[in-house]
Amino acid sequence: MITPIDFSGKRVLITGGAGFVGSNVVRAVYDAKGEITVLDDLFTGDLKNIDSDIKYKFVQGSVTDEKLVNKLVKNADYVAHLAARNIIVSTKNPREDYASNIGGTLNVLMAARENPKVKVVYTSSASVYGNPMHLPISENETPLTFSPYSVSKLGGENYCTAFYETYGVHVSVVRYSNVYGVKQDPANPYCGVVSKFVEAISDGKTISVHGDGMQTRDFTYVTDTVEATLIALLSPRADGMIFNVGSGFEVSILKLANEIGNALGKTPKIEHIDRRDIDNIRRRVLNIERIRSRLRWQPRTTLRQGIQKTVDWWKESR
Ligand SMILES: NC(=O)c1ccc[n+]([C@@H]2O[C@H](COP(=O)([O-])OP(=O)(O)OC[C@H]3O[C@@H](n4cnc5c(N)ncnc54)[C@H](O)[C@@H]3O)[C@@H](O)[C@H]2O)c1
């Protein structure tokens, strides 16, 4: 049986709740009757991402603020920890990344140690795998940290495991593949490839593809990612564990562009640029067997359905 997503009577702290995935977490927790506090410094987030019908408490501040994090975690039953500097910021400024992604995560865990009832879910990234030896990538693959971002995301994970083993903190890690869908705003310079392609192809602009475009990724629709995250947050069976969260399907960037073109009724114009990208990984697809068997989660949205939903949302929100 899948864990029912029900937060009735529970206080849920969502760090990074004004961001792309975080605002979708806010939606889902609110629909599941949770009492929500969002902590966000609005670095890439925007309160516009949070649907206007949702009641929540907003605290503008940083996860690097130890006192603030202590206070908020003390008043929570659950913490969904999504706040992070993204890969672009991190590549430009590894110190900033270190402070938020590792330091901020340590603050959350230190506060959780003082509040043994609280359960934390930490959102990590498939970037910790680098260029993997085996596909699809299982959680047992040896991490290869090729970017400062992957170092910090893995650092956060390692603290989670250490705090579980050493202090018994209830914490789970979810490693996301590429997430896409509603609220991923192409106006945000840090947004993912799906939204960028949707906007550019729709406007008849040429899209830039690194190398031959045959590099692959595993794209997960955001509501599926959010569901997996909340099941890991709620299920005691997830404590102390790391779970891949992906679609389990490998899609090349060229195929992605064509699928988006089909949904928009346009033929993508593509220019191939130099091979190097900041996320310079040839192939990535996640093995999702662990989360499927242990937490009974599996993605429900096909790539085609997800792209259609993204295109529809984007047209409405323009
Ligand atoms: N989107 C993806 O494809 C993807 C893939 C792998 C992992 N992730 C992880 O998922 C989480 C959410 O990512 P997202 O795509 O929604 O990114 P996002 O940039 O849209 O959201 C991050 C949010 O955290 C906030 N934030 C950043 N630093 C902060 C700080 N120091 N204190 C408080 N708030 C801070 C930002 O303002 C933003 O609202 C991140 O932890 C990210 O590493 C995302």
Image (tube, rainbow, N blue to C red):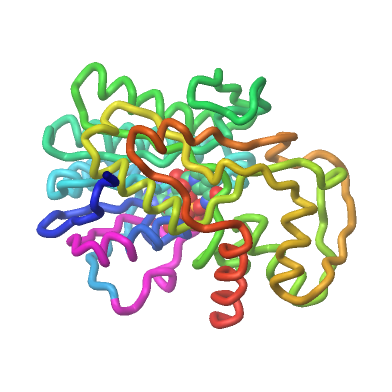
Q: Please state which of residues 159 and 5 is positioned toward the viewer in this rendering.
A: 5
Residue 51 on image: x %, y %: 37, 74
Answer whether residue 9 is magenta in the image: no
Quarter of the C terminus within the rendering: bottom right
Residue 17 horizontal/vertical position (percent): 36, 58
Q: Nearer the viewer, residue 105 or 225?
A: 225
Q: Does the magenta stretch include residue 42?
A: yes
Q: Tell me the quadrant of the picture where the N terminus can be found.
A: top left
Q: Magenta stretch?
A: 27-53
> Which residue shows up at 84% across the image and 40% down it?
275
Determine whether, in the image, residue 261 is placed left or right of residue 316: right
Q: Residue furthest front?
A: 1
**Picture quadrant of residue 214:** top right
| Residue 43 shows in the view | no
Above or below residue 29? Residue 292 is above
Task: Determine the residue positioned at 67% across, 56% down.
Answer: 193
